[in-house]
Amino acid sequence: MGLSGRKEKILQAVVDGYINSCEPISSAEIKERHLPALSTATIRNELAALEEMGYLVQPHTSAGRIPTAEAYRLYVERLMPKRKLTRSELKTVKRYFNRKITELDDILKSTAKVISEITNLTSVAYAQDINDAVIQNIKIVKLTDTTALVIIVTSLGILKDATLSLGANVDDEYCRTTGEFMTSVLANHSVSEVIKPNHLIKQVKKEYTQVFKTVLKILKSYSHEEMISDIVLEGSAKILEQPEYANLQKAKAMLELLDAKEELVPVLKNNDDMNLSIKIGKDNEIREGMPECAIVTANYSVNGVNIGQAGVIGPIRMDYPKVISVLDYIGKTINMLPEHAGESYAGDESRSDVDELQDDEE
């Protein structure tokens, strides 16, 4: 049975009030702050009806109501107000991204940090499985007479760089020709093909074997199995600041979840093509054995190529309008990052794309 417009307004008032206070919401409070035209008796009757429908619970007979997981689901689907970021929040995002960022690691770390800072929740970020990413270019940059930097550019952008010890004096020409040769062998091949080279390794000249091994090491560190250790978590201790986790057992369950990264991947991963995933529930409503929590994640892309997911893990009573607005704005910002190393980020210009995004929000 659908909800009447009045019931929806009252339910929204309860959810908004509970998000802000973490205290049961009374009929008197709803009348005073949200619906002054309704009598408290009418509001009480509607609250009782919403409780019977499974959207609200009353902790004690004399207390107000609090939302259920079902109420939050309806709230994010239909009732949630739109929320714009404040000028201060926009500046925080700009501070993290209005600079040159080319490596996937840096993007993930910056994303997790800024999400946690603005939402005051525990944030998570992890890279897309790169096995299908296509290698585009390999650069060898001289550092000293005996060391060089290996940079791999794929369809996901810069994955990682590593220092290569050459054990002999090398010049810039050697580095250039080595990079060109490695590119000629590996370009247009997927990461999964290079990790299991077989025929490719036969094409590598003996003098470039050491460089090839370094490239393999970099790519294998980004294989799906290894990525578990590269999940970025920020603000884990912020879980303990939430009233819901004042209970020692609940807090312990959440901290154990955050610590078990291998268990986080299937829970966080958005298997659909949706840009945004919102999972709200208790116990096995998200996954069997999960502590009571909500998980909101977004797919992030650079130049239209999906690089991974990021979002928040926290209490069911989280500020969904704010969280979703933060994830959306950061997604727009990340998508404007440069595709390859050496390209200047827009922040180097007199007016950046992030400035224009900020104008859009305001």
Image (tube, grey):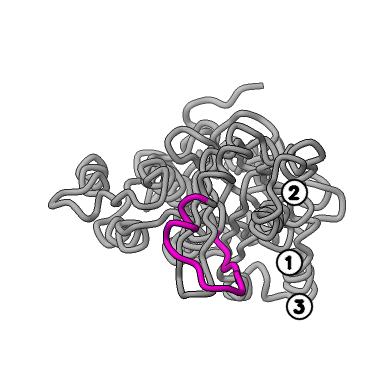
Describe residue 241's horizontal placement relative to residue 219 as left or right: left
- Estimate how packed mark 3 is, as few (under 14), some (14 to 19) or many (20 or more) residues with alpha carbons within 10 Å: few
Q: Position of residue 265 (x, y in %)?
A: 74, 51
Q: Which residue is mark 2?
A: 224
Q: Are marks 3 and 1 in contact (CB under 8 Å)?
A: no
Distance between the Cα atoms at labels 3 and 1?
Answer: 10 Å
Instruction: Give the quadrant of the N terminus.
Output: top right
Q: Nearer the viewer, mark 2 or mark 1?
A: 2
Tell me the SS state at disc 3.
helix
Work out whether mark 2 precedes mark 3 in sequence or the reverse, and give the earlier one.
2
Residue sitting at x 51%, y 43%: 137
What span is colored magenta in the figure?
161-177
Describe residue 189's horizontal placement relative to residue 9 as left or right: right
Comparing 110 with 286, the one in front is 110
Residue furthest toward the left? 350
Task: Give, as a three-letter code, the residue at label 2.
Answer: His
Q: Which residue is mark 3?
A: 248
- Estimate how packed mark 1 is, as few (under 14), some (14 to 19) or many (20 or more) residues with alpha carbons within 10 Å: many
In the depicted structure, whether residue 182 falls above or below residue 250: above
Residue sitting at x 34%, y 57%: 100
Tell me the SS state at disc 1.
helix
Describe residue 27's horizontal placement relative to residue 355 as left or right: right
Distance between the Cα atoms at labels 2 and 3?
Answer: 34 Å
Task: Give, as a three-letter code, the residue at label 3.
Answer: Leu
Q: Which mark is residue 279?
A: none
Tell me the SS state at disc 2.
helix
Residue sitting at x 49%, y 60%: 106
Q: Are marks 2 and 3 in contact (CB under 8 Å)?
A: no
Residue sitting at x 53%, y 38%: 136
Comparing 171 with 74, the one in front is 171
